[in-house]
Image (tube, rainbow, N blue to C red):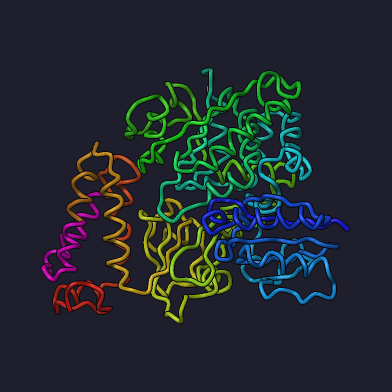
Amino acid sequence: MNSIIRVGMSTCGLAAGAQAVYTALEEQIRRHRLPVTLVRTGCLGACHREPLVEVIQEGVSTLYGPVTPLAVPTLLESHSNAAARPPQLSWVVSRQHNRADYPFLGRQVKVTTRLCGLIDPHSLDDYLANDGYAALRLALKMKPEAIVKTVLDSHLRGRGGAGFPTGQKWEIGRQQPAFPKYLICNADEGDPGAFMDRTMIEGDPHRLLEGMLIAAWAIGASKGYIYIRAEYPLAVKALHEAIRQARTYGVIGRNILGSGLDFEFVVKEGAGAFVCGEETALMHSIEGYRGMPSMRPPYPSVHGLWGQPTNINNVETYASVPSILLNGPDWFARMGTAKSGGTKAVALTGAIQNSGLVETPIGMTVREMIYDIAGGCRDGRTFKAVQLGGPSGGCIPAELLDTRIDYEDLRATGPSWVQAAWSSWMTRPVWWISPATSLTFTQDESCGKCIPCRVGTRKLLHMLTAITEGRGTQDDLVRLNSLCDTIRKTSLCGLGQTAPNPVQTTMRYFADEYHAHVNQKRCVAGSCRIG
């Protein structure tokens, strides 16, 4: 019986040596004329096990990882010779599609990442064999207002930050009388440690295109821009190839599938400016100007790209739409909470056992994410805090581990869910690792247009540095909190408005460490220049 072997060849896999493993497999299969189909796939999400190889034989899936080229002959022998001793690299053997027998994968519910690690992302046939473009065909038989209602009923909220109801945003765009209308996909993933967009595009680019095409029909848009970081060469290549394939298939161009929909895609590579993740700065960059934010209103749905109605969502939001149409809005809404339907992709990094990309229903607790999926802290460390939302997010201490990963619940703790996807486990003093490191990043990335962000973040960083060096005073703590409030209330865009989050949340939950540095000139964890 012919076996299938999948090799994860996304950025994380290649960085771990997947190309050498793939080449070794290819050579051994050819040399021994083995009845094996070798497939390149995207990332399954288990980055901590890369290079990852999956063998499917007689309905049984066996995952191996990390695999080295030297282990390839033994791995193949164990599957071609029943008497051979199985290699010690086996990670999990499962007859279940969701691999529920391994905690890292078993607790997940994959929607936007359903095909990542399962299909060849460069094969349109693979995508079509897994209901690819079936949702688009269904959508083109529906009235635009019916699609908008379906998305509204699903309780899908924008996964890029504010959590604005996606269907409501689409309805505003649909009602605009001006033409042409544009779509933008914000794939400018600038947060250090975040890799959701990259993983999804590298592993399943057609899903993004399909979601945007459905949005185009619902809103009446004629062109879509995918704004992606130039630092993602594999994702950029996958997008260009998928667009070429989709055009050949007939779902891009004029009169798509006989529906009357005309739509074109443009891939716009960004230069790596974090501020271009803000939608008005992003639009300026597309228009050829320097990426700097503008005051709102007017909002892009009314007055956006080149002054025309423009709908902006991120990769994960668009990628949720095909499954909503195929499975129904109630199916999606039931997976989440009362106000937030569906799943959320989370990039796990830091001092944890299992790093990688996971997708779980909205509403899972931080404790479940850390201990049931991430496997707890690495090297026997004691959990201290988790930072959610990248450099613009805040820290959640151990006493709040049962907080649900949900827009409303997270906001109640202090962090702004700018992109609640970057989770960094910290066991050293959080106020040094989180606020100072985050502020160094946000201060460097400030576009400089408004004084609160340009000057305020630099002042915050100088004050924090003084505290860590034993030069801080009690008055500094008062000024620190006051400056945070000023920056948050008066900055022009989200970058400045959320920059103080790491400082304010750590001052709230770890005040004793601040006071120890100021009053006792002592670092509780012994990691600063004092004490």
> Which residue sits at x=46%, y=56%?
420
Numbered range of the magenta stretch: 461-487
Measured from the top left, where is residue 497 in percent x and y?
A: 31, 48
> Which residue sits at x=55%, y=74%?
375
> Which residue sits at x=53%, y=27%?
266
- Tell which residue pokes out farthest to the right in this image: 1
Q: Quadrant of the C terminus?
A: bottom left
Question: Is residue 107 shown to the viewer in this render?
Answer: no
Measured from the top left, where is residue 213 in percent x and y?
A: 64, 31
Q: Nearer the viewer, residue 287 or 333?
A: 287
> Which residue sits at x=51%, y=58%?
347
Q: Is residue 429 left or right of residue 226?
A: left
Q: Is residue 158 above or below residue 250?
A: below
Measured from the top left, where is residue 191 in percent x and y?
A: 41, 51
Q: Nearer the viewer, residue 54 or 415?
A: 54
Magenta segment: does it hold 474?
A: yes
**Which quarter of the figure has residue 287?**
top left
Measured from the top left, where is residue 529 in percent x and y?
A: 18, 72
Decide whether the magenta segment is chiefly helix, strand or loop: helix
Q: Is residue 209 above or below residue 331?
A: above
Q: Is residue 131 left or right of residue 1?
A: left
Q: Is residue 73 left or right of residue 287?
A: right
- Tell which residue pokes out farthest to the front in this image: 31
